[in-house]
């Protein structure tokens, strides 16, 4: 290390503790991210301190070693089916928020969703992810019936839902119908920041209730957050990491905030790719067996973002299985990738890009062994 090694001593000690399975406090997570504090969390930063660059390099190398220890060079693919862009919510950062009258709305029929699954199965996908806005058309009855059909036709495949906040009874019905996993990014674990991102009728407490319900019911549960969202601070991110440490989800989705032109945050700066990569690496050390996607947002923000994510501990990619006619309509943020290796039909291209980066796309459900039900376990 250079002459800045004295600045690295405490952060490196914290990394070693994290890798050894020890828990960190909120203040200690803030210390891990201290180099980003004055620098800002967006893309307009002036450059990180030299000691932070050295720390990031060491952090990412540790995460890569842990990921290879747990999963080798395997990359797990999930077939993403964006089933509806109708949403009752009005989150200020989201392009499919209900107030966006410029959004071209659609919802897939049952037949279209099953057709997407069939195409995905033939391409080699063994996990399907049904994602959508909180669309009242997809009642609990419709969702459970659809889940039963998918699981009866492709019983060896894992089924993941990402359709928002529901009652515990609804989640229990989905689980009984055969749904294996549920993704619900918490977005932020800081109450003030939550209110900055969402309208008053939405509640962080309900979001957290949903995640604890999902864990307790037995789903492989996914949480996560945006990096560089408007109003976010290092303190917010430290709270996010403490929450993930407590919840111990089987999946964590982290991607940079990217603005959408039809939202109140249209003029805000995009989140930092480099900070996103550090957070991926921290999560891999904290939850060594976690399923950790290199998100579409990361690939959108940086051409090689997905491959770099893999080198920082990620092990999942989610190519798009939705009909090509609707992919551009599921516009959560501007310039969202949905073609080339981001598309299911570009699977060969994805395999080649991953192989060039030293990874192997595998045909496997890619289950996580799990971390218990949280609350200190």
Image (cartoon, helix red, strand yellow):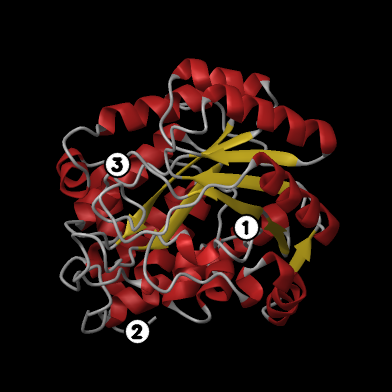
Residue 319 position within the rendered picture, expressed as x and y whole percent measured from the top left: 64, 63
Secondary structure type for disc 3: loop
Look at mark 1 in the image and give the residue it sits on.
322
Residue 292 position within the rendered picture, expressed as x and y whole percent measured from the top left: 56, 54
Q: Quadrant of residue 350?
A: bottom right
Horizontal placement of 250 versus 167: left or right?
A: right
Q: Is residue 295 above or below residue 171?
A: below
Cα separation, mark 2 vs mark 1, equals 49 Å
In depth, the one of 129 and 245 nearer the eye is 129
In percent of the image, x 50 and y 53: which residue is there? 285
Q: Quadrant of residue 31?
A: bottom left
Mark 2 vs mark 1, foreground winner is: 1
Secondary structure type for disc 1: loop
Q: Which mark, residue 2?
A: 2
Secondary structure type for disc 2: loop
Horizontal placement of 172 versus 192: left or right?
A: right
Look at mark 3 in the image and give the residue it sits on.
25
Q: Does residue 185 appear in this view?
A: yes
In percent of the image, x 80 and y 50: which residue is there? 118
């Amino acid at each position: 290390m250079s002459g800045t090694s004295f600045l690295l001593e405490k952060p490196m000690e914290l990394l070693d503790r994290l890798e050894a399975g020890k828990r960190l406090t909120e203040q200690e997570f803030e210390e891990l991210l201290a180099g980003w504090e004055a620098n800002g969390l967006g893309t307009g930063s002036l450059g990180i301190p030299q000691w932070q660059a050295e720390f990031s390099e060491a952090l990412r190398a540790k995460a890569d070693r842990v990921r290879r220890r747990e999963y080798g060079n395997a990359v797990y693919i999930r077939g993403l089916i964006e089933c509806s862009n109708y949403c009752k919510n009005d989150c200020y950062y989201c392009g499919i928020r209900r107030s966006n009258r410029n959004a071209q709305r659609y919802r897939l029929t049952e037949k279209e969703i099953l057709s997407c699954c069939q195409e995905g199965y033939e391409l080699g996908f063994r996990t399907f992810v049904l994602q959508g806005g909180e669309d009242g058309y997809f009642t609990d009855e419709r969702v459970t019936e659809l889940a039963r059909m998918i699981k009866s036709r492709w019983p060896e495949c894992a089924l993941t839902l990402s359709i928002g906040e529901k009652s515990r009874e609804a989640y229990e019905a989905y689980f009984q119908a055969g749904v294996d996993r549920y993704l619900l990014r918490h977005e932020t674990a800081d109450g003030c920041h939550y209110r900055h991102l969402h309208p008053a009728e939405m509640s962080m407490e309900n979001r957290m209730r949903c995640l604890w319900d999902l864990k307790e019911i037995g789903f492989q549960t996914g949480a996560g957050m945006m990096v560089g969202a408007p109003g976010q601070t290092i303190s917010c991110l430290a709270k996010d990491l403490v929450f993930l440490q407590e919840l111990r989800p089987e999946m964590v989705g982290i991607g940079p905030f990217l603005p959408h032109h039809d939202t109140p945050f249209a003029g805000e700066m995009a989140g930092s790719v480099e900070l996103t990569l550090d957070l991926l690496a921290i999560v891999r050390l904290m939850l060594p067996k976690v399923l950790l996607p290199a998100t579409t947002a990361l690939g959108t923000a940086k051409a090689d973002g997905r491959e770099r994510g893999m080198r920082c501990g990620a092990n999942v990619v989610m190519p798009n299985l939705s009909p090509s006619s609707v992919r551009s309509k599921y516009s959560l943020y501007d310039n969202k990738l949905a073609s080339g290796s981001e598309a299911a039909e570009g699977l060969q291209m994805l395999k080649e890009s991953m192989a060039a980066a030293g990874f192997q796309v595998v045909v496997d459900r890619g289950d996580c062994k799990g971390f218990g039900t949280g609350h200190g376990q």
